[in-house]
Image (cartoon, rainbow, N blue to C red):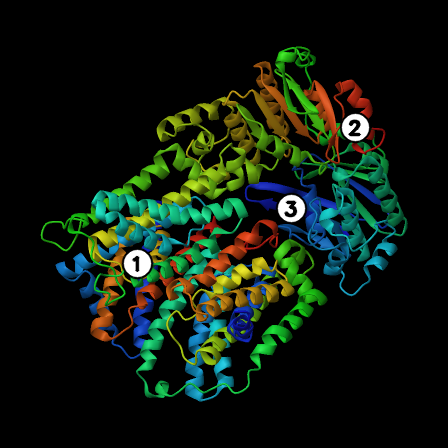
């Protein structure tokens, strides 16, 4: 497919998602013009809103990249949510040794958490679709345990941790709300692009994703690709969690993940699994998420509509790209 | 039943070109031709599975087809497979009525031999009492004794008034069983008639005579007698550097398993030409350059494209550019890309499974020449093929594979005498 | 300890009834060659539509019907994308989970503000679902799949769809029917969850039961007996953990919440290497 078609499809899917969101608002008696104006002003209407959108785009970009790497390699990692939490937990523990240690720990924790699924697949042939999802639930409850138990704040009032030391926090960019995580995330996008399209490892990863059996006959060790793809994918989701902790929340709490892992699937598919495309699609979903937050505050509409929007984008993209293949 | 002026195109390719054919009750029609001559397409139209672009099917009769690829559910029992197409009839009674022997209907199809599966397909077709029965390459998976059993059933059906169309490219079989022979080439009927000599039939089937085998190919390269040059692939299989060893056998006797085992166990500079080209050969979604670079230690897009362009010229691959998707190439050109990729590794060992299946004569000759050249450069080549001509044209030594077991190593002359009975599992 | 364990069994049976219904539905669908992760979303939607319908009509029976309708809408979407558009089933299923989470969260919040939905959810007096789920439905489905031509063809759709087409039958028709059966069962499952077990709807109340169901289908080797045994083993193991908790010395509550998922992982690892899935599973 030509790049122009790809972009056109993505725009169509994004527009359709916004359209359906507006329609469902109307169905429950909200004024569409009001909804759209809140959605826009709440996401990109002001410098403040734009900063909020960019802030939300950072974890989305990283979980989107995580999914893109996995899906490109033909690995069904639906476990971004759990790896995000593992990364945040890792970063929290590493934070006492400084920012670099915290970031490294988040990457490692995410990769390790994802690799549990790899091990189960290689040793017991357990499908990673299911194991990664189940690991999400386990991670959520582990975090719940941590912030109610060993990692609970010194005051023991709320189910949350203490704040990480200031030295481990990601620095703000100038006077803005933005933090240095955005630089890391964009660098990760370029890095993933380089890995997939400019290295022999990336070539083998993609070949395995397209046709496992042909890759095998060409002499590629496909199990090694699975191990690698899952670890990289988990590392990226883990980094997302680490950056969110070090740059935004500064502490852990029960609902820390709030869907970034699953949203990564929508981000990656809207970008058609292209690492540089995720830059744009992460921004789009960042805007939808902040806009939806504004809708909840001012119009009383549940912010879960953002999840609804993600679903519509995924469904539209798979219908559009499938149609193209049938025509070819 | 009669087909009149049938034409069928697939894209730019005319598969069947203005063909007319009568089906007379009680006759056995041998429909022969090379791969891609249009036999299967014509019969699919006769059976109503495919519609013609032009032409008519007059006085249609119930048609039964036994396809080259079985439509049997492996996980189901024989009885369940019969019920799938003939619900409500007793499986044992169906088999009895067909006059074909097949015991124990509770066995799962996965556990049947290839010959038994072919019988089950035939039973399914006969049970519907077709007036025209089309058999597409039915003997390609049968041992000679099983083929004889099949011929008896066919003759019996014809005697009862059924028209049997027997598609094959095996000349002796057609001469043995057919009462009328129809030869197709490039979508047209070239010759039609009763008795024909084997030579005339072969002449009609192919445009040029088959690839000649230069006698000097035998015994070139290293000396198989020198132990230092011999590579042991498995305890029963040794190939010397510079030698081509052929393994022949009826499909489904363990060839795929052998190739798979060798793929998993052999280490070092080993090249593989997989049997299932579309599934295992190339990554269709990737470019020619990417496919060629798959096993390389480095990937630099520009250098790889230049390298691919070079190989495209050398292997005479019909492609617009190295950046063309591999999946958009024709079968023969895909095979050349695989060959180019595998040979550029300068392999010590090359395992080639059915390297020319479905290729035209030109491409077949090219693949054969490349295999010989690789052997001359010192590669040990194992050729797994179901094409006897190919095995004898290339192999300096021959093994027969039957039910997963290899026969002892034979010279081509010895194999020429013993192969038919070994392939059928007798006289081992 | 043993006593507490025995006391936990009836509770375990009730608690795993929605799970069993989901397992049965997914088993039929997978036998027909599809893998539907969207079952999680089907249950969630059904849980909400069941509560809404029950409150609105003040009838428990209509509530269950509403649940089936909700599940059927999501099931139809799965069929539209996976069968009609031939989209990837895993991605489709995941999207439908998100769709259901987003939509139920949004719709439930909108409706809560309306007076009629402030009424109490009617109570369930007779539990006819439980015996149906554990005995009636699996027997009927086993009969359907193994002793009718429809069932034979449905199973062939999961193994070799071309063999079904060759006999003049429609693969799509059989797969749509399988989806319809799954919709009814997951509809009942979702409704049972929100009407019989919780008497109310809560966001994300299905909590991964759909995914656990998929794992149990594998554990039960795509057979009804295996499905029942698998669900029972899972239910009792989960209940035993709670019983131990009640018995004193304790694992912290939050860790206990993770137990069902850990059990499922162990189940998958224990069995998955040794089973053979339907040949054409997930290849629409």
Residue A6 placement (x, y as % from top left) = 35, 49
Q: Secondary structure at mark 1?
A: loop
Specify the subunit that label 3 lies on. Answer: B
Residue B364 placement (x, y as % from top left) = 62, 27
Q: How many marks?
A: 3
Specify the subunit that label 1 lies on. Answer: A
Q: Nearer the viewer, residue A229 or B325?
A: A229
Residue occupied by mark 3: B7
Query: Does residue B69 appear in the picture of this structure?
Result: yes
* Label at residue A150: 1
Q: CA distance from mark 2 to mark 1?
A: 90 Å
The C terminus of chain B lies in quadrant: top right
Residue B262 placement (x, y as % from top left) = 61, 30
* Label at residue A171: none
Q: Nearer the viewer, residue B410 or A225?
A: A225
Q: CA distance from mark 1 to mark 3?
A: 79 Å
Q: Secondary structure at mark 2?
A: helix
Query: Does residue B3 appear in the picture of this structure?
Result: no
* Label at residue B200: 2
Contact, mark 3 vs mark 2 (Cβ under 8 Å): no
**Viewer-side label of 1, 3:** 1
């Amino acid at each position: 497919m030509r790049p122009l078609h790809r972009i056109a499809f993505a725009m169509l899917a994004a527009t359709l998602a916004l359209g359906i969101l507006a329609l469902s608002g109307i169905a429950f008696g909200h004024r569409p013009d009001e909804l759209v104006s809140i959605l826009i002003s709440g996401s990109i209407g002001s410098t403040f809103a734009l900063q909020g959108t960019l802030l939300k785009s950072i974890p989305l970009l990283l979980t989107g990249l995580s999914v893109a790497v996995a899906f490109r390699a033909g690995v069904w990692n639906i476990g971004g949510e759990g790896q995000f939490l593992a990364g945040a937990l890792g970063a929290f523990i590493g934070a006492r040794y400084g920012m670099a240690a915290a970031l490294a720990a988040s990457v490692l924790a995410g990769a390790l958490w994802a690799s549990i699924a790899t091990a189960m697949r290689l040793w017991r042939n357990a499908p990673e679709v299911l194991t990664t999802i189940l690991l999400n639930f386990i991670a959520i409850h582990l975090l719940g345990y941590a912030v109610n138990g060993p990692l609970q704040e010194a005051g023991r009032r709320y189910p949350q941790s203490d704040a990480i030391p200031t030295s481990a926090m990601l620095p703000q960019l100038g006077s803005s709300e933005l933090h240095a995580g955005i630089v890391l995330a964009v660098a990760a996008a370029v890095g993933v692009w380089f890995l997939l399209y400019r290295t022999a490892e990336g070539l083998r990863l993609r070949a395995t994703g397209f046709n496992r059996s042909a890759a095998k006959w060409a002499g590629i060790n496909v199990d090694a690709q699975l191990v690698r793809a899952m670890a990289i994918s988990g590392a990226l989701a883990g980094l997302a969690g680490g950056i969110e902790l070090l740059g935004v929340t500064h502490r852990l709490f029960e609902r820390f993940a709030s869907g970034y892992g699953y949203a990564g699937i929508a981000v990656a598919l809207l970008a058609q699994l292209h690492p540089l495309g995720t830059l744009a699609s992460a921004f789009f979903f960042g805007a939808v998420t902040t806009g939806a937050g504004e809708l909840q505050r001012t119009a009383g509409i549940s912010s879960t509509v953002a999840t609804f929007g993600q679903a519509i984008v995924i469904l539209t993209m798979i219908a559009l790209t499938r149609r193209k293949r049938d025509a070819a | 039943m009669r087909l009149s002026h049938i034409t069928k195109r697939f894209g730019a390719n005319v598969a069947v070109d203005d063909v007319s054919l009568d089906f007379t009750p009680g006759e056995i029609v041998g429909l022969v031709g090379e791969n891609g001559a249009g036999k299967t397409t014509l019969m699919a139209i006769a059976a109503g599975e495919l519609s013609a672009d032009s032409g008519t099917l007059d006085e249609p009769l119930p048609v039964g087809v036994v396809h080259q690829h079985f439509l049997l559910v492996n996980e189901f029992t024989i009885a369940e497979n019969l019920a799938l197409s003939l619900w409500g009839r007793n499986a044992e009674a169906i088999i009895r009525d067909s006059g074909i022997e097949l015991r124990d209907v509770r066995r799962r199809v996965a556990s049947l031999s290839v010959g038994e599966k072919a019988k089950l397909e035939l039973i399914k077709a006969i049970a519907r009492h077709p007036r025209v029965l089309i058999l597409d390459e039915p003997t390609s998976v049968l041992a000679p004794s099983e083929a004889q059993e099949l011929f008896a059933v066919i003759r019996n059906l014809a005697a009862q008034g059924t028209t049997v169309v027997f598609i094959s490219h095996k000349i002796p079989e057609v001469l043995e069983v057919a009462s009328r022979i129809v030869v197709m080439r490039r979508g047209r009927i070239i010759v039609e008639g009763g008795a024909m000599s084997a030579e005339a039939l072969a002449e009609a089937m192919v445009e040029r005579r088959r690839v000649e085998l230069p006698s000097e190919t035998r015994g070139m390269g290293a000396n198989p007698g020198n132990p230092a040059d011999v590579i042991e692939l498995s305890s029963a299989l040794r190939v010397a550097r510079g030698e081509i060893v052929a393994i022949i056998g009826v499909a489904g006797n363990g060839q795929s398993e052998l190739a798979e085992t060798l793929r998993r166990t052999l280490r070092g500079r080993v090249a593989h030409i997989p049997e299932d080209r579309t599934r295992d050969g190339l990554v269709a979604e990737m470019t020619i350059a990417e496919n060629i670079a798959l096993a390389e230690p480095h990937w630099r897009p520009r250098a790889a494209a230049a390298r691919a362009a070079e190989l495209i010229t050398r292997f005479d691959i019909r492609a617009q550019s190295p950046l063309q998707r591999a999946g958009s190439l024709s079968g023969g050109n895909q095979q050349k890309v695989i060959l180019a990729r595998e040979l550029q590794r300068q392999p010590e060992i090359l395992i080639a499974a059915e390297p020319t299946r479905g290729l035209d004569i030109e491409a077949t000759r090219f693949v054969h020449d490349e295999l010989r050249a690789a052997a001359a450069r010192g590669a040990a080549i194992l050729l797994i093929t179901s094409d006897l001509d190919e095995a004898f044209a290339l192999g300096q030594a021959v093994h027969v594979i039957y039910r997963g077991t290899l026969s002892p190593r034979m010279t081509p002359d010895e194999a020429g005498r013993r192969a038919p009975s070994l392939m059928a599992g007798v006289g081992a | 300890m043993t006593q507490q364990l025995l006391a936990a069994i009836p509770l375990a049976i009730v608690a795993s009834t929605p799970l069993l219904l989901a397992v049965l539905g997914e088993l039929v669908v997978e036998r027909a060659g599809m893998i539907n992760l969207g079952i999680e979303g089907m249950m969630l939607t059904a849980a909400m539509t069941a509560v809404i319908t029950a409150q609105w009509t003040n009838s428990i029976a209509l509530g269950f019907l509403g649940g089936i309708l909700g599940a059927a809408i999501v099931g139809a979407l799965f069929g539209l994308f996976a069968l009609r558009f031939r989209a990837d089933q895993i991605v489709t299923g995941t999207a439908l989970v998100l769709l259901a989470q987003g939509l139920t969260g949004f719709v439930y919040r909108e409706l809560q503000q309306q007076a009629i939905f402030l009424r109490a959810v009617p109570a369930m007096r007779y539990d006819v679902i439980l015996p149906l789920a554990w005995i009636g439905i699996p027997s009927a489905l086993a009969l359907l799949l193994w002793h009718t031509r429809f069932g034979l063809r449905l199973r062939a759709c999961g193994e070799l769809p071309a063999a079904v087409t060759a006999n003049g039958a429609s693969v799509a028709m059989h797969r749509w029917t399988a989806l319809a059966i799954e919709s009814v069962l997951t509809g009942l499952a979702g409704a049972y969850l929100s009407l019989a077990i919780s008497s109310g709807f809560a966001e994300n109340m299905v909590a991964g039961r759909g995914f656990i169901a998929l794992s149990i289908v594998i554990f039960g080797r795509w057979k009804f007996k295996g499905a029942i045994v698998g669900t029972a083993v899972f239910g009792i193991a989960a209940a035993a953990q709670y019983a131990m908790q009640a018995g004193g010395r304790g694992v912290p509550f939050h860790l206990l919440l993770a137990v069902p998922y850990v059990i499922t992982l162990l189940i998958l690892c224990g069995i998955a290497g040794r089973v053979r899935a339907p040949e054409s599973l997930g290849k629409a």
